Amino acid sequence: MKLLNIQQIREWDAFTVRHEPVSSPDLMERAGRACTDYLIRHFSREYAFLVFCGLGNNGGDGLVIARLLAGYGYRVDVVVLKHANRRSDDFSLNLKRLENVPEVPVHEVVSGDQLAALPGRDKNAEMQEPDSGSRMVIIDALLGSGISKPLEGLLAETVNYINNSGRQVISIDVPTGLPADIEQWNAAIYKNLVTAHTTLTFQVPKTSFLFPDAGRFCGTLSVLDIGLHTDFLPGLSSDMEYIDKAFIDPLIKPRHKFDHKGNFGHALLVAGSRGKNGAAILAARACLRSGAGLLSVGVPQHSYPILQTAVPEAMVLPDNSDDYPVFSFGPGKYTAVGVGAGIGTEAKTLEGYKRFLQALRKPVVIDADGLNLLAGLLKTEPGFRIPENSVLTPHVKEFSRLAGEAGNSYERFHHLREFAATHQAHVLLKGAHSCLAAPDGTCYFNSTGNPAMAKGGSGDVLTGMITALLAQGYNPRDAALLGMYFHGKAGDSAARKRPASAVIASDIIEEISIEVSTA
Ligand SMILES: NC(=O)C1=CN([C@@H]2O[C@H](COP(=O)(O)OP(=O)(O)OC[C@H]3O[C@@H](n4cnc5c(N)ncnc54)[C@H](O)[C@@H]3O)[C@@H](O)[C@H]2O)[C@@H](O)CC1
Ligand SMILES: Nc1ncnc2c1ncn2[C@@H]1O[C@H](COP(=O)(O)OP(=O)(O)O)[C@@H](O)[C@H]1O
Ligand SMILES: [K+]
């Protein structure tokens, strides 16, 4: 899915109105319907809703949601915030429609002192008398993608009230006060924003949602399809993609009846050192679960029995050293290589590693200490070149060793793009929305994964997965994208089986399933 800026989304909206054709109020009805469907799937009628509406189209969405929820028998109160004199046409139309639904009280707020009189203000009293009022959820439909400047006055006070309510907050389209385009975001200026538990956004994620500094205000992100006209997209240029099922499924190569292990490549992983054999085991298991035909793991000699016991499906290639790898073997017969997880940064490792990379003519994934050593090589040896067809998988700290510190996540994104182009490598910056920068400047943001994966060992699993995909003949871009997407998907499955704090990297490996899914 292409990522668009707000101007492009507005044009898409208008294109849909003209070409479907659909009236603007009907499009708003569709957006409100999509949110309502989400809400009734996630909340029983024991919950009540307090819907905060601004005077623009985001507020209009809120009014539609309130009317539809009431139709399903939910208790709903609406707060209309009179923050300006102008209201949008579709807002006015939907306010009129709500007048025909007398069971939904509409509270007009013109000044901050009225906020204290709104329903559900005393959460403690409600908890003492469970039958007296339902658990109340706040719907934030104050402002959406239309914000042009930081909030102040009544809007800022209301945002503050919502954030301090202790309620679950669901933002419609955009958390109020957050600029939707990342270019507009500035943490020093935008200070009054809704902090949502969930954001239900229309059609495409807004770019600011994907960067940690700004995206942390969204909570869990759900992208709702409101059926904007797909004919609009081919004519559109965007060098940012959001990687979802529709993008990924066509990349997957099927297995055929007469295929044999020789068709799926022979992967070599060089990983682990004394105290870090776990990295080699995790990467090896993940590599096998991701479809490599054969796997060899190059390890220092003390690791030999450990690897043979922990991963009987893999062959083990003992290095000419006891504690840490020295790369006494060459890249030889292997189809693809994964290097770096847990190898340490000893001088002898560096020496062997440099030779190994220089001799390498195979697709390679470089991770962890492999990146730290590479950062040193790029600095100390100006002519040193990253091997062709490389996929680098740094986390933020590793990336700053390669490309320098950045002041914020957007600046880091520019460094990422630049680094990928300069070194003609695919660079996958890991995080909540991991981002793969391709040498041609295109950036691919991941849609899968969750905080259960924020634990040592998750990255080793990703290395094993991408190595397996390269070994099977996927090009570096597709291998990195498939690895990134299915790694997150496996993390999501693992997090459905246990609390997030209890998920470990081995659980992610158990859930790896690189195939076209029906869900
Ligand atoms: N394709 C889509 O994405 C659709 C979007 N719709 C909704 O339309 C919204 C955009 O609506 P609008 O353009 O009316 O904008 P908003 O509802 O976000 O804002 C309303 C108005 O508030 C004023 N305003 C902006 N920043 C302000 C500030 N800092 N202080 C005070 N006032 C400020 C502006 O005049 C702005 O037009 C989306 O976020 C979404 O909720 C849906 O209704 C239909 C389809
Ligand atoms: N909050 C999060 N949401 C989604 N994915 C996450 C989150 N935190 C971590 N991950 C994923 O988990 C992996 C962690 O990798 P890394 O930091 O290298 O861990 P390690 O080296 O300790 O194994 C990355 O792929 C990252 O995208
Ligand atoms: K909003």
Image (cartoon, rainbow, N blue to C red):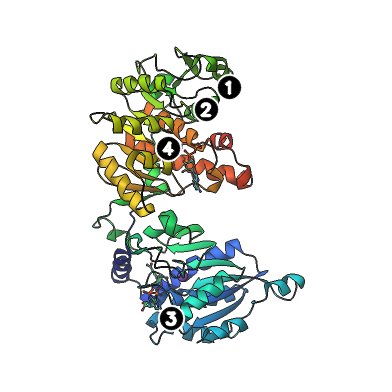
Mark 1 and mark 3: Cα distance apart in space: 62 Å
Beta carbon of the mark 3 residue lies under 8 A of ligand 1: yes
- Amino acid tagged 1: Ala
Query: Looking at the rendered structure, which numbered label has been put on residue 285?
Result: 2
Determine the secondary structure under disc 2. Answer: helix
Q: Position of residue 14 (x, y in %)?
A: 30, 70
- Amino acid tagged 3: Leu
Query: Looking at the rendered structure, which numbered label has been put on residue 266?
Result: none
Mark 1 and mark 4: Cα distance apart in space: 23 Å
- Amino acid tagged 4: Gly
Q: Tell which circle, 2 or 3, labels the residue nearer the N-terminal end.
A: 3
- Amino acid tagged 2: Arg
Q: Tell which circle, 4 or 2, labels the residue nearer the N-terminal end.
A: 2
Task: Identify the residue shown where x is 59% and y is 84%.
Answer: 105
Q: Nearer the viewer, residue 154 or 262?
A: 154
Q: Tell which circle, 1 or 2, labels the residue nearer the N-terminal end.
A: 2
Beta carbon of the mark 1 residue lies under 8 A of ligand 2: no
Determine the secondary structure under disc 4. Answer: helix
| Total marks placed | 4
Residue topped by disc 1? 310
Task: Identify the residue shown where x is 54% and y is 81%.
Answer: 79
Q: Tell which circle, 4 or 3, labels the residue nearer the N-terminal end.
A: 3
Q: Tell which circle, 1 or 3, labels the residue nearer the N-terminal end.
A: 3
Q: Up-down: is 176 above or below 225?
A: below
* Marks 1 & 2, CB-CB < 8 Å contact: yes
Residue topped by disc 4? 483
Callout 4 crowding tier (Cα within 10 Å): few <14, some 14–19, many ≥20: many
Beta carbon of the mark 4 residue lies under 8 A of ligand 2: no
Q: Position of residue 428 (x, y in %)?
A: 38, 41
